Amino acid sequence: MKRILGLLLAAVAAPIFMAPAAAQAADAAGYSLAPTVSTTVLTAESCADDPLCLPAPEPAGNGADDRTALMAVVAKAGALATTGAPATVFLRPGVYTLAKPLKLLPNVNLRGSGITATTLVTAPDSFANFSYSFLVRPDDAAAPVDGSTSLVSDLTVNGNCKAGAGLTTDRVPPATSCDHGASTNSGGGIKAGDRWTIQHVRFTNLEYFKLWINGTTGVRVIDNRWDNLGGAGSGDEDNIGGGGFATDTVVSDNQFDGTMLGNSLDVVNMSGLVFQRNTVFTDPAMLTRFNREDNGTVYFEAVTDSEIRDNTFYGGHIVLKSNAGYSHTGNNKNVTNPKGILVRNNTIIGSYGSGITVGYTDYTDPDGSLGTGNVATDPNDPSTHTLWTGGNNVIQDNTIDRPADAGILVFGCYDAAKTRPDTITGNVVRDAGRRSSTVSTGCGTFDAVGIGLSIGRGDKVYGNSVTDSAAAKGTWYGVQLGSRTAKTTLSNTDLSGGDNTSTGVVVGAYRYGVGSPETPVGDTASRTGGSATLTWRESTALSGIPVGGYRVYRNGTLIADLPAGSTPVPGNLLSDNGTGWTAGTKSTTVTPKNGILTVAATAAGTASAQGPVTTVTPGKTYTATASFKSDNVGRRVRTGLVWLDANGTAVSSKLYTSNTATSDSADGWITSTFAAQAPVNAVSARVLTVVEGVSAGEIHYQGRLGLSAGTSTQSFDDAGAPSSGAVSYQVVAYRTGGVSGSELSSPAVLTLS
């Protein structure tokens, strides 16, 4: 379903993800037009024996319009039909051509001679008659009949998107566009009415929504097929769409072929919807063919009190969200968040995104306020709306294999959008993070994890299993509680119902999304002889979040732990004897020894030092670096530089980083950097350091003092790098302390090709 606005759940800077070949292979082997839920196909003989069954004429053939003749039979059937005793229009084998929609009266069935025997096709050059309409639909002019039922079964609806295509089931590439040039809102398949059953129907070659269920009650969608076999074409509208506060809908035992285009189901504003025992096949070649990042996904938007259970998805996945991303009018003026939905016993294989996501959102009114929580508001008042809050969803016993991003994510943009706890239990996630090590939700960033949760009070997360068995590991943590840069809060999460287990993940079982350092910026990865050299920029210091160092992973395996201050900086200026380093003010003395500069304060104020004169090239960027550690009392520390001309005269004032979040301590080193471009009249520079607010007698240490060309201030040589082939390195900054004992930044990814 097309959105005006919306939250995209995708990996950061993610390319189109190619699902495992197994997904495509399963499609070719698994999709079948043969019914799996048995009913007797109507025959001419059995119709003749039934006084409530009226046979339609033979198809006129040669593209001639059959609609007038069929509507005459529908009218006769309507005159015979009663509630509890519907009449049937029987379609013979062949292709019936419709120049206008075929409209069914209440209590009238439309039954073909079999899904491969009878076809309804849109007449060429008639698409203007199908604008926002369908081959088969209710007759809206007929008086509604309480308790009426209708059955549409055992036939194919073919929208003629690609002229003459879809009449066979040959597995050839689908058409990339429709022939007739009409609007994409012309020529849908079937629009369901109240208590309609659609069973054993093939939907193919359709430009508009394939099946539309909107504002209805009691619809049953059983054992149908969606494809673009036989060279058929397709618009990108959903295979099943609608909503409109429909109730009591069951979508069961259907199959979606890898040649279909669009979401398998996307509905907005529904309750009492059951999506069960369906199989969604996707073909990764379709993503490239139609320039899509996703296909076959199920969207429950503003859906409550419903179920998604016992389904199998190859490539597709499950999304529960609100309707806040739509234009805020009509049915979408008020916002409904996912509530009371059971997602159980689904198998999701090679999904193009995260396996299951639940998003809680709202929009702000003109005065900047959120909707009024769970209280009806005036539908004609544009200044306010209702926020129907969500929660009480259960995600249970699902199996998610090889998702592109995370296994299960529950997130929010506003705390007010969720007022009931969710339960996530008994799920199995294997080999998550096949695409990227981070996942952006628009409301905060998660790592590639088995299960992530960033909104709620008292949610239950227990008994889940997360495993990464791949050689190039992608799953960083088993469970992440709290996303990075989250817009919502999380508290009192209940982990006591049974252990969550994590096996083979990169870092550990849990990650807490608070107090983590900024991500370092990866610059280069290159092979040098038998090793690889990596360079990256320091993680930007944050207040109260000291960077304890960096860890380097090769294909998800830890190969180096580099505590702050432990590695030389490119362009190191501190020799063992400290030649050229002098005290900057009268309140300081400096003593170099063994590569460390001891800075002693002789009076209260600022203790400073300056390095030796270093040649620079005008116009180039240079980065001054210094790591600091205190003897006892921690103070704010900063790094800077001064540019000099050929005479050694300063051509600029002393320049220091404006980042004041760096404070040294006795527990470990902290690094401060400052980058600037050398002016045209600069031929050299000095590195400057300051320790602010010292008292007389304080001792502070400085190391890794350097002036680097460019912005990279960290490097690592991997002597064990493979001599050829692609290698992925992940570099993270870490802090000591924090909720989990060692909070990691998101990874910077460096790749050797």
Image: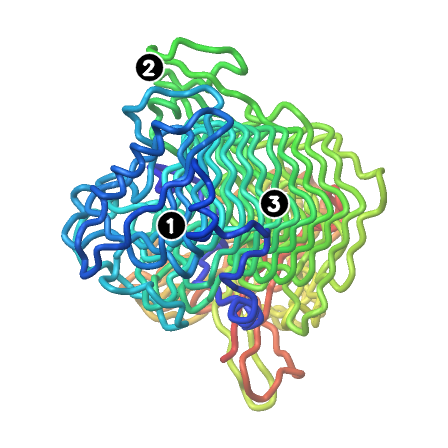
Is 295 left, or right, of 168 in this rendering? right
Residue 267 is left or right of residue 99, and the answer is: right
Decide which of 436, 58 is in the foreground and name it. Answer: 58
Residue wearing tag 1: 653
475, above or below 638, in the image: below
Where is residue 436 drawn, in percent x and y? Answer: 54, 60
Q: Which amino acid does label 1 sit on?
A: Ser
Position in image of residue 304 (x %, y %): 56, 29
Name which of mark 2 and mark 1 comes first in the sequence.
Answer: 2
Q: Earlier in the sequence, mark 3 or mark 1?
A: 3
Neighbour class for label 2 at 10 Å: few (<14), some, many (≥20)?
Answer: few
In this view, the mark in front (3 or 1): 3
Q: Considering depth in this image, is 701 or 334 the residue closer to the camera?
A: 334
Residue type of the residue flagged with mark 2: Pro
Residue 495 is at least partly visible in this image: yes
Label 3's element? strand
The residue where tag 2 is placed is: 382
Q: Residue at x 45, y 52 (%)?
A: 45
Residue 608 seen in the figure = no
